[in-house]
Image (cartoon, rainbow, N blue to C red):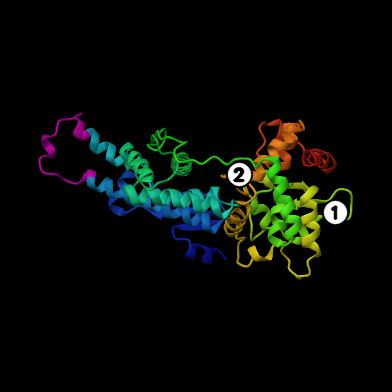
Amino acid sequence: MTKLLTISVPYTFVRSGYFYFSRRVPSDLQAHYSCPRIVVALNTQSKQQAKTLAQAAAASLDVYWAKLRLARSEVIGQHLVRSGTDLEQSSLHTVSTVSPKLSEALDFYLSLKGVGRPVSFEAAARRACGYVFEVAGDKALLDYRRTDALSLRDWLKARGQAGSSITRNFSSIKAVFNFACSEWAIEAKNPFVGVFHDRTAGVVSRSPIPLISIRHVQKACFEIDDDLRWLVALVADTGLRLAEAAGLSKEDFQGLGTSLPYIRLVKHPWRNLKSDSSERLVPLTGSALWAAQRLLQADNAAHFAFPRYNRQETTSANAASAALNKWMKAYVPEGCTMHGFRHSMRDRLRAVECPTEIADQLGGWTAGSVGQGYGTGYPLEILHKWIEKAVER
């Protein structure tokens, strides 16, 4: 088994289940080392992580050795260079400042930080770094300059990206850069930190849907009574994210024959959740309870609550959003969308003076304090009481 792992992961061997990096020092450079071979523990049992770490280490050594050879080579007029001059210091600095490329840092970052994260996490990091490659190229981390960051900002603005999108892209780039420098003990100032841009430029605020409009939408849902309207009605009185609702299975609906019906919202292979706090119990009442009853009564032998949006490997939340937003235009003020129900639910909970901690748990919003992370949260009975107050208002 060890031999197979060693062959599939170059420059490594396995001892007691853990990978070690191993590489022979070239004979012409052995005078710089105290032993002829470099052996370092990679502190991982994962073949994929070991491969990423070993590739990055090997690439760094290749660059470092090349610069050692360059610094040692004879250059015409080298004997005339005065000791302590900027030229000499620059030569020494070149030998000591070796860093991996951004692409290597990205792979390393994802191999460790991306474990257990949704597909969107990796997609966002690769997309953001891809923008850097397009504008400034794939360079060693220490070779990026402030001008590269400023050029990236201007390029993203020219592409028409909103301020919030530019912020997200820079956040991903900074995270990759900082993580690599920290893990590989590279002393460098991140040139992508503190780049100014207007974060509000091009950002369209999402308006809550007025209560009277919610009632009009619900009335239309009851009259039309099809799977699209069930989805709207379900979101209207729960505040679920549209992707959360569209990706439900019928098994996620619990207790419909009891006084405390609810949705057990969990991650699925076809639909992830935005964050850990998004995994929660969602009480069913009002139009949401009606929708749950109707879709479970539907004789379609489907595993999914909304089969039309789960015909591929992943839930087609964008398709649901486009169709439902178009239909709702006749019932809600201009600028209101399906996501507005989520904003409205927060306002409806405020209107009945629902405690913030309970509101956060109902909506799957990230906890605002350390204390909120302790314990298992409020029981279903308490959650049901408050959402009923908000819906019946």
Q: Is residue 86 visible?
A: yes
Name the amino acid type tagged 2. Pro
User: Which quadrant, please, contains the C terminus?
Assistant: top right
Q: Are marks 1 and 2 in contact (CB under 8 Å)?
A: no
The quarter holding residue 298 reads bottom right
Location of mark 2 (residue) = 333
- Whichever of labels 1 and 2 marks the residue nearer the N terminus, that label is 1
Location of mark 1 (residue) = 255
Residue 74 counted in the magenta span: yes
Question: Which residue is more in the foreground, 303 or 177?
Answer: 303
The percent coordinates of residue 5 (x first, y second) are: 53, 63
Residue occupying the point 78% across, 41% down: 387
Local SS, label 1 = loop
Q: Is residue 164 left or right of residue 288?
A: left
The percent coordinates of residue 74 (x first, y second) are: 16, 45
Question: Which residue is more in the foreground, 259 or 76?
Answer: 259
Question: Which residue is more in the foreground, 369 or 33?
Answer: 369
Residue occupying the point 85% across, 54% down: 255
Give the residues in magenta. Answer: 71-88
Name the amino acid type tagged 1. Gly
The quarter holding residue 15 reads bottom right
**Position above or below: 165 against 51:** above
